[in-house]
Image (spheres, grey):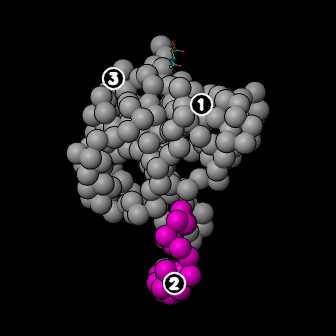
Amino acid sequence: MAYVVYTLLVAFFSVVHNDIVDAQSPTHWGRCPQHVPAVELDLEKFQGLWYEVERTFYVFELLAVCPRFNFTLLDDGSLEVQFFMKNRVYQDTNVYTGEVVPERKNPSVWDVRPKTSLPSMISRILPGSGKYYVLDTDYDNFAILWSCSNMGLMHSDLIWILGRDKKISPLHRSLIYSTLDSFKIDDGRLTLSKQKDCD
Ligand SMILES: *[C@@H]1O[C@H](CO)[C@@H](O)[C@H](O)[C@H]1NC(C)=O
């Protein structure tokens, strides 16, 4: 019975929701879709510098320009990630360091936590923490990162398109978009990251 009510509620609200919430919104009704990433991720090849080329709206990055990631594989099999971003207003560059713990059986599923001296209960709710999925990568050109969090009756998901270069070729872009389509992830929300005038 509870399930029926729940389903009806979700159906009702998704109709209303589609009319009133614009396409930029990362929030959708229902639970996170269960994606099984198609790549056997080679963490060693994934290492190094990646530019954020496109992403969905993310409050934490509102003032960010020149966003880039640097992944380093550590001896214990985890990755250290450094996220660099320049502040559009103050023009200073900030570095955030995080710990990526890949699942043993499926290394393209990541548990990401900011590296801080804060208790883990607090660091878990900091921006950037959560479950991430590498949906696809060819290591040399592009990577698709996707993250989803359940929030009661709703879920919120974020997409990052990373490139080894600041731009992605039309060929790779069409590959990326068809991959997102195959996972039924709405790519209409992607916007270009600001990579102009960065060194
Ligand atoms: C990435 O991190 C590694 C290890 O800390 C470092 O050797 C390398 O210089 C970094 N690359 C960039 C572009 O920051």
Residue pictured at 38% horizontal, 31% vertical: 165
Asked if labels 1 and 3 touch by Cβ distance under 8 angstroms, the answer is no
Residue under label 1, please give it: 84
Q: Which quarter of the figure has residue 142?
A: top left
Asked if labels 3 and 2 touch by Cβ distance under 8 angstroms, the answer is no
Residue pictured at 49% horizontal, 16% vertical: 74
Query: Looking at the picture, how far across and down is residue 83, in whole percent?
Result: 58, 31
Instruction: Tell whether circle 1 marks a residue whose Cβ is less than 8 angstroms from ligand 1.
Output: yes
| N-terminal label among 2 and 1 | 2
Query: Looking at the picture, how far across and down is residue 189, in whole percent?
Result: 46, 61
- Which of these two is toward me, 193 or 101? 193
Residue pictured at 37% horizontal, 27% vertical: 46
Residue under label 2, please give it: 19
- Give the main secondary structure of the magenta stretch: helix
Circle 3: residue type: Lys
> Secondary structure beneath disc 3?
helix
Query: Looking at the picture, how far across and down is residue 195, in whole percent?
Result: 50, 38
Vertical placement of 69 versus 31: above or below? above
Instruction: Tell whether circle 2 marks a residue whose Cβ is less than 8 angstroms from ligand 1.
Output: no
Q: Is residue 102 visible?
A: no
Vertical placement of 56 versus 90: above or below? below
The range drawn in magenta is 4-29
Is residue 105 rendered to the left or right of residue 155? left
- Which of these two is toward me, 135 or 82? 82
Q: Residue furthest top?
A: 75
